[in-house]
Image (spheres, helix red, strand yellow):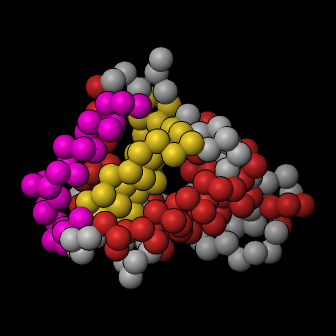
Amino acid sequence: MSKKVLILSGSPRKGGNSDVLCDEFMRGALESGNDVEKIRVAEKKIGYCSGCYYCQQSGGICAKKDDMPEILQKMIDADVIVLSSPVYFYSIDAQLKTVIDRTVARWTEVKDKEFYYIVTCADEERESQERTIECFRGYLDCVEGAVEKGIIYGTGVYQVGEINNSPAFAEAYEMGKTV
């Protein structure tokens, strides 16, 4: 059965290591017959949530006028969501965290999703990525019916392109095929 897959690439570097893993995951998911869209979050205009809760009085419409309503609707419509972030100072990057925070406008509608995570970092140890994974899991704790399906750990990569020679490169493709 074909699924609607949304990949949220938090990488600020187009063609950066986590962005490349998103492409490989997408290639595998497409080959398996899924409908896949990748959004490069850094290329979108997304303001920070200011906690004004205008959205609570306006039926989920945010006071900020930017690209987030379109992204949020795609998250609501997706069967599968891939959250991808490079690790900066042991946590999720600002671009993707902003998207997660902005789902507050309609967060109860983002439900019954399968989630995959893609993380990359310069450190060789997976432990350096665990806080980022915990950030993702914290979000999933708030999403009704969320199911964590898989994690791609891209370790020991810093310069653009280093991921191409890592085990994570093949893992991303293979995991995408299992969607």
Farthest residue in the right direction? 57
Q: Is residue 146 visible?
A: yes
Main secondary structure type of the part rendered in magenta: helix
Name the residue at 21% across, 71% down.
Answer: 124
For this view, does 36 lie left or right of residue 109? left
Name the residue at 74% across, 58% down.
Answer: 105
Res 125 quadrant in image: bottom left
Q: How many labels sit on residues?
A: 0
Name the residue at 35% across, 70% down.
Answer: 127
Residue bounds of the magenta highlight: 155-179
Front residue (pair 74, 3): 3
Where residue 147 sits: x, y (%)? 57, 42
Q: Is residue 45 magenta?
A: no
Q: Is residue 118 above or below residue 12?
A: above
Instruction: State the quadrant of the C terminus.
Output: top left
Where residue 5 sits: x, y (%)? 47, 36
Q: Is residue 12 above or below residue 175?
A: below
Where residue 109 sits: x, y (%)? 73, 44
